[in-house]
Image (cartoon, helix red, strand yellow):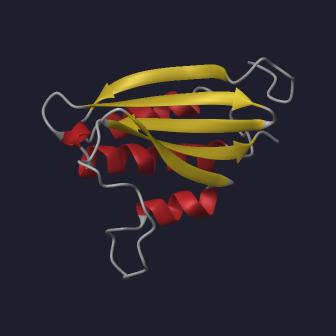
Amino acid sequence: MTEVGRATEGPVVLGEITLPGLRRSVAYARAFLRDLLPSGHPVLDDLVTVGSETVCNAVAHTASGHPGGRVTVVLLADRGAYRLEVTDDGAGGARPRLETEGGGEIGRGMRIVDALARRWGHREEGDRTVVWAEFPAT
């Protein structure tokens, strides 16, 4: 395991996986992330929950959920933090956003991400969208 607090030339990729854009891929993403950090690590559960939410959103709300779609999950370590990145196949210009509380099950995913991650955001990579979330390494 890379020491997260150690100075490096830049981020270190701890793991990367590309999954088909299917609902069952959410479970594979959870297992993949759970295997990257030691059991009992203070941010493990939050990181896995955020990974699950963002992969689920990618499958449900972007072209990743269409036939042949894919979702890529990457975990990086850099300067005392873990950075989770989930890349989807794009949503025709739609971007992840916080929904106002409506009391239903729809729209809660990004509120969960916002509550659990130290910070989060998104960026464009061609037609694809990368949703990222950072967690303290301690």
Q: Nearer the viewer, residue 36 or 99?
A: 99
- Looking at the image, which residue sits at the far bottom? 102
Could you tell me residue 11's position as x and y percent? 69, 24
Q: Nearer the viewer, residue 8 or 127?
A: 127
Q: Residue at x 33, y 45 (%)?
A: 58
Could you tell me residue 45's position as x and y percent? 61, 47
Q: How many marks?
A: 0
Residue 93 appears anywhere in the view:
yes
Residue 38 appears anywhere in the view:
no
- Looking at the image, which residue sits at the far left? 67
Could you tell me residue 128's position as x and y percent? 34, 36
* The C terminus - image quarter: top right
Where 61 falls versus 101 (above or below)? above
Q: Which quarter of the figure has residue 26?
A: top left
Q: Nearer the viewer, residue 93 or 16?
A: 93
Q: Which quarter of the figure has residue 35?
A: top right
* The N terminus - image quarter: top right
Q: Residue at x 70, y 28 (%)?
A: 77
Could you tell me residue 121's position as x and y percent? 54, 51
Q: Is residue 103 left or right of residue 21?
A: right
Q: Residue at x 41, y 72 (%)?
A: 99
Q: Nearer the viewer, residue 44 or 123?
A: 123
Q: Which quarter of the figure has residue 59?
A: top left
Q: Residue at x 40, y 56 (%)?
A: 96
